[in-house]
Amino acid sequence: SSGESLSARAPNGANGARLGCEWQLQRPEDERVLQRWIDHAQVRQRLGQRSGRRAGQDATAGVAVAGPGA
């Protein structure tokens, strides 16, 4: 035992544990397929973040504010 702790702090301050994995790829093309999947997942995540921000902006863009005497 190296004396390292397995516990970690999660972003919300809760205690958690770290988990890792290792890919045992059998064929060279497996690595390319995995990398392509990771790239597409990252693109989908970025697109989802953009659409979420855009939806919040769109929701406030069409709001009319009534002034005095309206």
Image: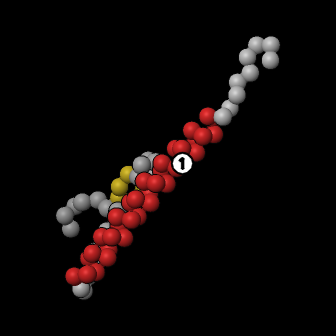
Query: Residue 13: where, in percent of width, then height?
Result: 44, 47
Q: Residues within 10 Å of mark 1 (few under 14, many from 20)?
A: few
| Residue drawn at 52 percent across, 50 percent down | 51
Of all residues, the one furthest to the top in this rendering is 69
Q: What quarter of the picture does the C terminus occupy?
A: top right
Q: Which residue is painted at 41% across and 64% down in the image?
A: 41
Quarter of the figure with residue 15? bottom left
Where in the figure is residue 68, as x and y percent of width and height?
Answer: 76, 13
Instruction: State the quadrant of the N terminus.
Output: bottom left
Percent of width and height locating residue 23? 28, 77
Residue at the spot 34% in from the left edge and 64% down from the top edge: 39
Which residue in the rendered view is the most extreme toward the bottom? 26
At horizontal 28% and vertical 81% (from top left) the residue drawn is 30
Instruction: Name the image colouring.
Output: secondary structure
Locate residue 16 relative to residue 33 in the image: left or right: right
Q: Quadrant of residue 5?
A: bottom left
**In the depicted view, which residue is nearer to us: 4 or 22?**
22
| Residue reaching furthest to the right | 69
Q: Is residue 3 above or below residue 62?
A: below
Mark 1 secondary-structure assignment: helix
Residue in the foreground of this view, choosing between 18 and 42: 42
Identify the residue under disc 1.
52
- The answer to whether residue 67 is left or right of residue 32 is right
Q: Is residue 61 visible?
A: yes
Does residue 21 appear anywhere in the picture? no
User: Where's residue 47, x and y in %?
Assistant: 46, 54
Describe residue 47's horizontal placement relative to residue 39 as left or right.
Answer: right
